[in-house]
Image: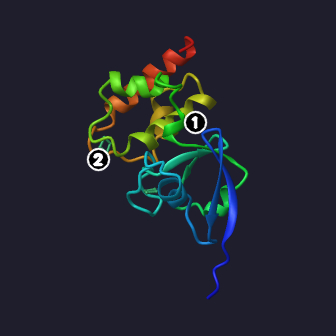
Amino acid sequence: MIMRKEIATFTVNGHEYEVIIEPHMLLIDVLRDKLGLTGTKYACGAGDCGACTVLIDGNPTFSCLTLAVTAKGKSILTIEGLADGTELHPIQKAFVDRGAIQCGYCTPGMVLTAKALLDENPQPTRQEIKQGLAGNLCRCTGYVKIIEAVETAACAMRNGG
Ligand code: FES
Ligand code: FES
Protein backbone atom coordinates (compact mmCIF):
# COMPACT_ATOMS: atom_id res chain seq x y z
CA MET A 1 0.00 0.00 0.00
CA ILE A 2 1.32 3.45 -0.88
CA MET A 3 1.18 5.93 1.99
CA ARG A 4 1.21 9.45 0.68
CA LYS A 5 3.17 11.76 2.92
CA GLU A 6 2.57 15.46 2.95
CA ILE A 7 3.97 18.53 4.62
CA ALA A 8 1.20 19.89 6.82
CA THR A 9 1.08 23.15 8.73
CA PHE A 10 -0.31 23.09 12.25
CA THR A 11 -0.95 26.04 14.51
CA VAL A 12 -0.22 24.90 18.04
CA ASN A 13 -0.24 27.27 21.00
CA GLY A 14 -0.01 30.20 18.60
CA HIS A 15 3.03 28.90 16.73
CA GLU A 16 3.05 27.45 13.23
CA TYR A 17 4.81 24.15 12.65
CA GLU A 18 5.43 22.29 9.42
CA VAL A 19 5.34 18.55 9.91
CA ILE A 20 5.62 15.62 7.51
CA ILE A 21 2.57 13.48 8.12
CA GLU A 22 0.93 10.41 6.66
CA PRO A 23 -2.84 10.08 6.20
CA HIS A 24 -3.30 7.64 9.08
CA MET A 25 -1.36 9.70 11.65
CA LEU A 26 -3.16 10.71 14.79
CA LEU A 27 -2.98 14.21 16.20
CA ILE A 28 -1.62 12.95 19.52
CA ASP A 29 1.34 11.40 17.74
CA VAL A 30 2.10 14.62 15.90
CA LEU A 31 1.93 16.59 19.16
CA ARG A 32 3.96 14.20 21.27
CA ASP A 33 6.37 12.58 18.83
CA LYS A 34 6.89 15.24 16.16
CA LEU A 35 6.56 18.42 18.24
CA GLY A 36 7.71 17.08 21.62
CA LEU A 37 4.61 18.38 23.38
CA THR A 38 4.33 15.51 25.81
CA GLY A 39 1.93 17.30 28.16
CA THR A 40 -0.85 15.72 26.12
CA LYS A 41 -1.24 12.26 27.62
CA TYR A 42 -2.05 8.94 26.00
CA ALA A 43 -4.03 6.44 28.05
CA CYS A 44 -6.96 4.47 26.64
CA GLY A 45 -6.55 5.38 23.00
CA ALA A 46 -10.27 4.80 22.57
CA GLY A 47 -12.09 7.98 23.54
CA ASP A 48 -12.94 6.70 27.01
CA CYS A 49 -10.72 8.71 29.37
CA GLY A 50 -10.02 12.24 28.10
CA ALA A 51 -6.33 12.18 29.01
CA CYS A 52 -5.43 13.18 25.45
CA THR A 53 -7.79 16.18 25.33
CA VAL A 54 -6.62 19.28 23.49
CA LEU A 55 -8.67 22.25 22.35
CA ILE A 56 -9.21 22.63 18.61
CA ASP A 57 -10.68 26.01 17.80
CA GLY A 58 -11.71 26.12 21.46
CA ASN A 59 -13.47 22.75 21.51
CA PRO A 60 -12.27 19.85 23.67
CA THR A 61 -11.11 17.11 21.32
CA PHE A 62 -9.70 13.65 21.95
CA SER A 63 -6.42 13.80 20.10
CA CYS A 64 -6.14 9.98 20.25
CA LEU A 65 -9.14 9.73 17.92
CA THR A 66 -8.36 12.68 15.67
CA LEU A 67 -6.56 12.26 12.39
CA ALA A 68 -3.83 14.86 12.24
CA VAL A 69 -4.83 15.81 8.73
CA THR A 70 -8.20 17.08 9.99
CA ALA A 71 -6.49 19.55 12.33
CA LYS A 72 -4.59 21.35 9.60
CA GLY A 73 -5.31 25.07 9.56
CA LYS A 74 -7.10 24.99 12.91
CA SER A 75 -5.97 26.50 16.16
CA ILE A 76 -4.75 23.82 18.57
CA LEU A 77 -4.19 24.51 22.25
CA THR A 78 -2.26 22.05 24.39
CA ILE A 79 -1.46 22.31 28.07
CA GLU A 80 1.94 23.79 27.18
CA GLY A 81 0.21 26.82 25.72
CA LEU A 82 -1.96 27.70 28.68
CA ALA A 83 0.40 29.47 31.04
CA ASP A 84 1.45 33.04 30.33
CA GLY A 85 5.21 32.69 30.50
CA THR A 86 5.93 31.64 34.06
CA GLU A 87 2.47 32.73 35.22
CA LEU A 88 0.11 29.78 35.50
CA HIS A 89 -3.38 30.10 34.07
CA PRO A 90 -5.99 30.56 36.85
CA ILE A 91 -7.28 27.03 36.22
CA GLN A 92 -3.80 25.59 36.65
CA LYS A 93 -3.32 27.67 39.80
CA ALA A 94 -6.62 26.48 41.21
CA PHE A 95 -5.78 22.82 40.55
CA VAL A 96 -2.52 23.27 42.46
CA ASP A 97 -4.03 25.30 45.29
CA ARG A 98 -7.03 22.99 45.81
CA GLY A 99 -4.95 19.80 45.71
CA ALA A 100 -6.76 18.58 42.59
CA ILE A 101 -3.66 16.84 41.25
CA GLN A 102 -2.26 13.54 42.46
CA CYS A 103 -0.45 11.51 39.79
CA GLY A 104 -1.23 14.29 37.31
CA TYR A 105 -1.90 12.03 34.37
CA CYS A 106 -5.45 13.26 33.84
CA THR A 107 -4.63 16.87 34.68
CA PRO A 108 -3.77 18.35 31.26
CA GLY A 109 -6.99 17.01 29.79
CA MET A 110 -9.02 18.07 32.81
CA VAL A 111 -7.60 21.58 32.78
CA LEU A 112 -8.19 22.08 29.06
CA THR A 113 -11.71 20.70 29.28
CA ALA A 114 -12.37 23.03 32.21
CA LYS A 115 -11.04 25.94 30.15
CA ALA A 116 -13.48 25.23 27.35
CA LEU A 117 -16.30 24.97 29.89
CA LEU A 118 -15.45 28.25 31.62
CA ASP A 119 -14.91 30.08 28.33
CA GLU A 120 -18.46 29.14 27.41
CA ASN A 121 -20.04 29.34 30.85
CA PRO A 122 -18.12 31.58 33.29
CA GLN A 123 -20.37 30.74 36.24
CA PRO A 124 -21.25 27.06 36.00
CA THR A 125 -23.19 25.22 38.67
CA ARG A 126 -21.61 22.23 40.34
CA GLN A 127 -23.83 20.03 38.17
CA GLU A 128 -22.70 21.81 35.01
CA ILE A 129 -19.06 21.31 36.02
CA LYS A 130 -19.70 17.59 36.55
CA GLN A 131 -21.39 17.36 33.16
CA GLY A 132 -18.65 19.38 31.48
CA LEU A 133 -15.94 17.10 32.85
CA ALA A 134 -17.88 13.87 32.36
CA GLY A 135 -15.61 12.71 29.53
CA ASN A 136 -12.45 13.05 31.63
CA LEU A 137 -11.59 10.25 34.03
CA CYS A 138 -9.39 10.53 37.11
CA ARG A 139 -8.20 7.43 38.91
CA CYS A 140 -6.77 9.27 41.92
CA THR A 141 -8.64 12.24 43.30
CA GLY A 142 -12.25 11.16 43.60
CA TYR A 143 -13.22 14.29 41.61
CA VAL A 144 -14.31 16.46 44.57
CA LYS A 145 -11.13 18.52 44.59
CA ILE A 146 -11.21 18.83 40.80
CA ILE A 147 -14.74 20.22 40.92
CA GLU A 148 -13.74 22.59 43.72
CA ALA A 149 -10.74 23.71 41.67
CA VAL A 150 -12.94 24.52 38.69
CA GLU A 151 -15.26 26.53 40.98
CA THR A 152 -12.26 28.39 42.38
CA ALA A 153 -10.91 29.06 38.90
CA ALA A 154 -14.29 30.28 37.67
CA CYS A 155 -14.43 32.75 40.54
CA ALA A 156 -10.84 33.92 39.92
CA MET A 157 -11.46 34.35 36.19
CA ARG A 158 -14.64 36.33 36.77
CA ASN A 159 -12.63 38.59 39.03
CA GLY A 160 -10.00 39.13 36.39
CA GLY A 161 -7.43 36.56 37.09
S1 FES B 1 -6.31 8.54 25.47
FE1 FES B 1 -7.74 9.62 24.26
S2 FES B 1 -9.64 9.39 25.29
FE2 FES B 1 -8.25 8.15 26.42
S1 FES C 1 -4.61 12.76 39.33
FE1 FES C 1 -4.10 10.71 38.78
S2 FES C 1 -5.53 10.21 37.23
FE2 FES C 1 -6.18 12.14 37.95
Q: Earlier in the sequence, mark 2 or mark 1?
A: 1
User: What's the amino acid at mark 2?
Assistant: Arg
Q: Secondary structure at mark 2?
A: loop
Q: Which residue is mark 1?
A: 116
Whole-percent x, y for residue 86 in the image:
46, 24
CB of mark 2 near ligand 2 (< 8 Å): yes
The reply, left or right, for residue 66 in relation to residue 138 is right
Q: Residue at x 65, y 38 (%)?
A: 14
Above or below, 116 relative to 155: below
Quarter of the rendered image showing ligand 1: bottom left
Q: Residue at x 61, y 61 (%)?
A: 68
Q: Secondary structure at mark 1?
A: helix
Asked which colour scheme the image uses, the reply is rainbow
Total labels: the figure holds 2
Q: Residue at x 54, y 46 (%)?
A: 54
Camera-side residue: 82 or 49?
82
Residue farthest to the top, as pictured: 159
Q: Which residue is mark 2?
A: 139
The reply, left or right, for residue 119 in relation to residue 38 is right
The reply, left or right, for residue 115 in relation to residue 7 is left
**Quarter-of-image position of residue 95:** top left
Q: Residue at x 31, y 34 (%)?
A: 101
